[in-house]
Image (cartoon, rainbow, N blue to C red):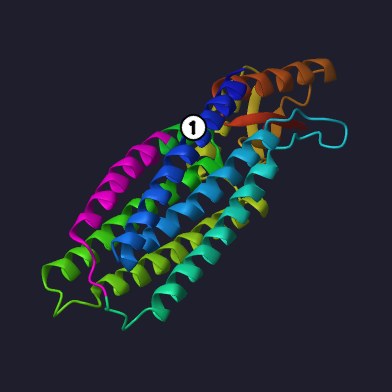
Amino acid sequence: MHHEHNLAGARRIAIVGMLVTASLAVMKIVAGWKGHSAAVFADGLESAADVFSTGLVFTGLVLASRPADSNHPYGHGRVEILTGLVLGLTLFGAGTLIAWTSLMKFGDVEHAPEPWTVYPLLISIGAKFVLMVVKYRHSKGSGSFSMKADAAHDGIDMVSGLVALGALSFALWKPAAFGQADHYGAFAVGLIVMLTAVRVVREASMHLMDTMPDDLAMLDVRRVAIGVEGVRGVEKCYARKTGLQYHVDLHLEVDPEITVRESHEIANEVRYAIRRKLVWVADVLVHVEPWPGG
């Protein structure tokens, strides 16, 4: 129930994020075009790519929420990680396009930027800061990888807005000396988006390769298991991510003289205790082994 509530909340945030970002994208693209600012126009293109990426996140969350079936006993959560991978590749393409477009316009200072083009950037920076905080907090609570990637993208969108603002300010301050600053700012926005994409793709690839969670998380699993009555030790302990949560494989050591029924009951109690106390764990597969101690 808690898991389904998180998914519903994530979907609502994704939809609101798309609507806000779409409005910002249109505003900045029109302002950059009408106000002759390459940096503002580039930041608008970056926001347009953000709309597409948030749509991907929403699609991934919808597919990930489908229940497990006979062909997918671990559920459909890994679709969400694939969404993060596609998102990263999309961002890299958008960043390349922005950087290339700004390169093609170097030397074009026929029209100086209009001073009012600063305001759309300021509005965008503020809105993106709010979206970033909301998405990041929700990703921490739900364990959603693509929501975390989307929060990071909003943060980078805010940084790219600040870079565009700085470049535009130089161009407005001394047009004769810094006439090219606006185009350099647009190029920097493209590079920032490309670097973000590389980081997102790397993190998604790590999850697809079943990279373990951090050491503290695995210690929590061992601590909960050891706390169950009848458990003498924990040998191997693995975990792999299947979307929003992890599946844990645990090798449990019990007294070799007890019955199979007793060891089974201990294993079940460990499984339920871990799922109850660690919300990031979807399920636990327990292997029971004889304790080697005397």
Residue drawn at (49%, 40%) of the image: 18
At 31% from the left edge and 73% from the top edge, which residue is drawn? 183
Q: Nearer the viewer, residue 45 or 220?
A: 45
Q: Position of residue 283 (x, y in %)?
A: 69, 29
Q: Is residue 278 visible?
A: no
Does residue 26 appear anywhere in the picture?
yes
View extreme (right): residue = 70
Q: Is residue 27 above or below residue 100?
A: above
Our reading of the magenta stretch's main secondary structure is helix
On screen, residue 236 versus residue 48, left or right, reads right
Report which residue position mark 1 lands on: 13
Where is residue 255 shown, x and y percent of the image?
72, 24
Which quadrant would the C terminus be assigned to in this image? top right
Residue at coordinates 14% horizontally, 80% vertically from top-left?
177
Depth check, front residue: 207 or 101: 101
Residue interval drawn in magenta: 111-134
Amino acid residing under circle 1: Ile
> Number of numbered discs present?
1
Q: Inspect the magenta stretch and tell me whether residue 114 lies in it.
A: yes
